[in-house]
Amino acid sequence: MTSNSDLFLRAKQVIPGGVNSPVRAFGSVGGTPYFVTHAKGPFIYDAEENCYIDYVQSYGPGILGHAHPAVVKAITEAAAKGTTFGAPTEAEIKLAEMVSERIQGLELVRFVSSGTEATMSAIRLARGATGRNRILKFAGCYHGHSDALLAAGGSGVANQGLSGCEGVTPGAVADTIVAPYNVVPEIDETVAAIIVEPVAANMGLVAPNPSFLTELRKVCDQTGALLIFDEVITGFRLAHGGAAEYFGVTPDIWCFGKVVGGGLPVGAFGARREIMENLAPLGGVYQAGTLSGNPLAMAAGRATLELLNQEAHTQLVTTATRLADGLDEVFTAAGFSVSVPRVGSLVGLFFGDQTPPTNFDEAQKLAENGIYSKVFHALLRNGVAFAPGPYEGLFPSLVHSDQIIDTTLERAASAIASI
Ligand SMILES: *Cc1c(COP(=O)(O)O)cnc(C)c1O
């Protein structure tokens, strides 16, 4: 048996920091990452044959749990027919039809290979469609790692303790305005777009104030800026029609990722016809991808969305509520000052205050108090895997049964007794 630490040493010889995405290196919680051998349903197994109940679920794609039979079958069947062609397929049409059926107001959608590509392309599209340069984002919202959107990002950027990013030129972010989340910004007619996570899920979970999204819609309507919802996490998770349906606010452009790919590399962005027609080959905004609309990825996405009916969404909310209420109870009983914010099926976890944060400054104060990493390691030792950083949410899936949640809560109770 190879140990996690042996693998980590070996990985570091050939991969920067031993990982292909920074949060995985355990930098913000300390210690050695577990190297995964396989995963099934709610469980993930490492090189030392430890089994964890997994609440990372790849940070969101695993809404059906790991290796769901329908997804495995869809990918296997697609793979046998060829993995990439550089020519269009019916599989792309089918997934596009599913997306536009679910998302009211989205008429055309283009598939890319990551959430980063989706938001990057959405920004370019917004600039092209409006002829304006500036964009506004909110501190603590993460929109992937394209240059213009890396300013004051959450998730991995925050986990690494970076305020910005070396290698991003002042020019690349000169047209990016950063504003505090949950405060309606004043903008003028130089702004092409406001991009927002309708529920912020990369600074821990921060809910939008009741009027925040409707006010953003108004500000955009008044100034002619486009409203972009980055639904890479909320899309197909928060509700059948995502955050737009959940909050009853319709953006101009949607970005998707994670769930829409069913565990394969997929992102997507879409809008009403008139906006999307600015994209090449119809319009002058260039955007492309060798592996975009990849047949395996389309098959995995379709198999996943097919299982996400209203009943599934109701079940996810029930599961998330059981988890959130249970964690709150367990930690409170152990004397922790804790908040477990929940919006629909999205769950966050903050230590140090019973009032959940409303913006990045407040979230950072709680995230940086050092409590999370102690809890994280205690849970891991007890067979429960939360994200290795305080800025991520929890991702219970459709196979996290009541029994799995209850086992999680029992393990959490004994884990914190050991801190
Ligand atoms: C994960 C995430 C992204 C980036 O997606 P990648 O597939 O990692 O490039 C963008 N926006 C949000 C809200 C995300 O959570």
Image (tube, helix red, strand yellow):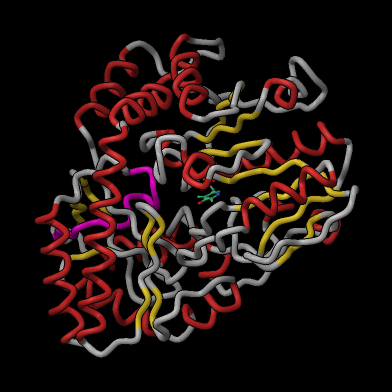
Decide if residue 187 is on the left or right side of residue 81.
right
How many marks can you see? 0
Look at the picture and state if 164 lies above or below 285.
below
| Residue 212 visible within the image | yes
User: Which residue is painted at 54% across and 29% down in the image?
Assistant: 104
Residue 32, image quadrant: bottom left
Residue 6 visible, this orientation? no
Taking the image as shown, residue 339 lies to the left or right of residue 396, namely: right
Q: Nearer the viewer, residue 141 or 243?
A: 243
The answer to which quarter of the image holds residue 275 is: top right
For the N terminus, which image quadrant?
A: bottom left
Give x and y (percent) for residue 361: 60, 77
- Could you say where residue 161 lies in the image, as x and y percent from the top left? 57, 74
Rendered view: 271 above or below 179: above
- Residue sitting at x 11%, y 71%: 410
Q: Please report the bounds of the magenta region as a residue range.
A: 50-62
Q: Is residue 43 magenta?
A: no
Work out whether residue 128 or residue 335 is closer to the camera in this orientation and state it.
Answer: 335
Residue 419 occupies which quadrant of the picture? bottom left
Q: Is residue 58 magenta?
A: yes
Residue 54 drawn at (x, y percent): 24, 56
Which residue does the image show at 38% across and 81% down from the upper left? 351
Q: Nearer the viewer, residue 127 or 161?
A: 127
Q: On screen, 309 above or below 387? A: above
Q: Position of residue 76 (x, y in %)?
A: 27, 21
Whether residue 88 sits left or right of residue 378 in the image: it is right
**Residue shown at the point (52%, 23%) measured from the top left:** 100
